[in-house]
Image: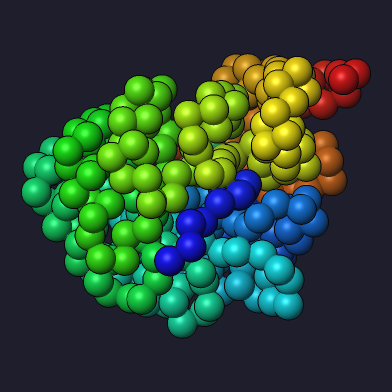
Amino acid sequence: TKKMSGMYAALMTGLNDDGAFDEARQRALTDYVLGQGLAGLYVGGSSGEAGLLDVEELSQQQGIVADCAQGRDTTLIAHVGMPNLRDSIRLAEQAAGLGYHALSALPPHSYPFSDAEIEGYYRDLAAATDLPLIVYEVPVRTGRPIPLDSLVRILDLPNVSGIKFTSTDTFKFSMLRRQRPDSSYFFGFDEIYTTGKVLGANGGIGTTYNLLGKLYVALDAAMNDGDLRRAQELQDVSQIFVEALLETGVLPGMKIALRLQGIDCGPTRAPMALRMPEDKAEAHMRAVLERPE
Ligand code: NAY
């Protein structure tokens, strides 16, 4: 099968002011992101506050996004990683029925599972539908990197087509790619995408792409053209934006920045919260967005 590639927004979630899932806000945000010329959307992942939503809300969101994407040339990846395999499979089956093109899942991490349990989870999830499955290595989220030999075994499972690698262990990324060159490699840290690309990433998936989608498409193109000066300029802009988000909290700050662009997707769901008063966060994000390039 052909490798997957390109730049994907890890789609964020529309909530109302009380923190309930909000269909209208989800649609407006999805249309805004679809307008940025990215390869597609990664739906229901960390950036979508999936760890704070329930299965009903995630299935509703899958349906809304599929509907917004109707008739558009875009690739939809459904993140279906839930604390238990049954819910993950339920979301995967629904995504397949809705016409999603691929699946992805965080490794189970609500208990200290063994490598064998994690591999078993991916084996069963991958077997549940015909869709290609993208493994997710993200130790900052799970608290535990998956060992290289275990990642290789997961990539060898039927229907497992690639990995979203969100770790600064880039040597491990390279070793994995050289051991399994036919898999698809997505790099998950927006602020160092160039690093992943140099080491062979086929694309990127990230939070800040919701807003800076065009910038990341241009960054990937600059890298493909070998225009390293341009790539570095663009990566600097992305880094300055991420630095600002680290002060507000990444997702809460993104929601402020999106609202400043006219896209209100509400607050983040508790307990996730802004790390500074709202008026201060607004001024902080406005200053970054208005910064001359
Ligand atoms: C997802 O699952 O929604 C993602 O793709 C998240 C990717 C992000 N990584 C994490 C750990 O959340 O975009 C990155 C990240 O927000 C960005 O690089 C800022 O550090």
- Give me the residue at 48% from left, 29% from top: 199
Q: Quadrant of residue 172?
A: top left
Q: Between 195 and 239, which is closer to the camera in this rendering?
A: 195
Left or right, 17 with reference to 79: right
Q: Position of residue 272 (x, y in %)?
A: 49, 35
Residue 52 visible in image: no
Could you tell whether 221 is left or right of 124 in the image? right
Quarter containing the N terminus = bottom left
Q: Quadrant of residue 73?
A: bottom right
Q: Looking at the image, which residue is at 37% across and 45% down?
A: 181
In the displayed structure, does residue 234 sit left or right of residue 15? right
Total marks in image: 0
Q: Residue furthest bottom?
A: 97
Q: Provide residue 59's location: percent of width, then percent of height.
A: 47, 70
Measured as percent of width and height from the top left, residue 101 is found at 51, 69
- Seen in the picture, residue 176 relative to 76 is either above or below; the reply is above
Residue at the spot 24% in from the left edge and 43% down from the top edge: 151
Check the picture and name the quadrant holding the C terminus. top right
Colour setup of the view: rainbow
Q: Kindly tell me whether residue 81 is visible in this rendering.
A: yes
Residue located 22% across and 60% down the image? 157
Is 130 rendered above or below residue 112?
Answer: below
Quarter-of-image position of residue 146 = top left
The front one of 156 and 117 is 156
130 lies left or right of 192? left
Asked if residue 24 is positioned above or below residue 90 in the image, the reply reads above
Determine whether 261 is above or below 198 in the image. below
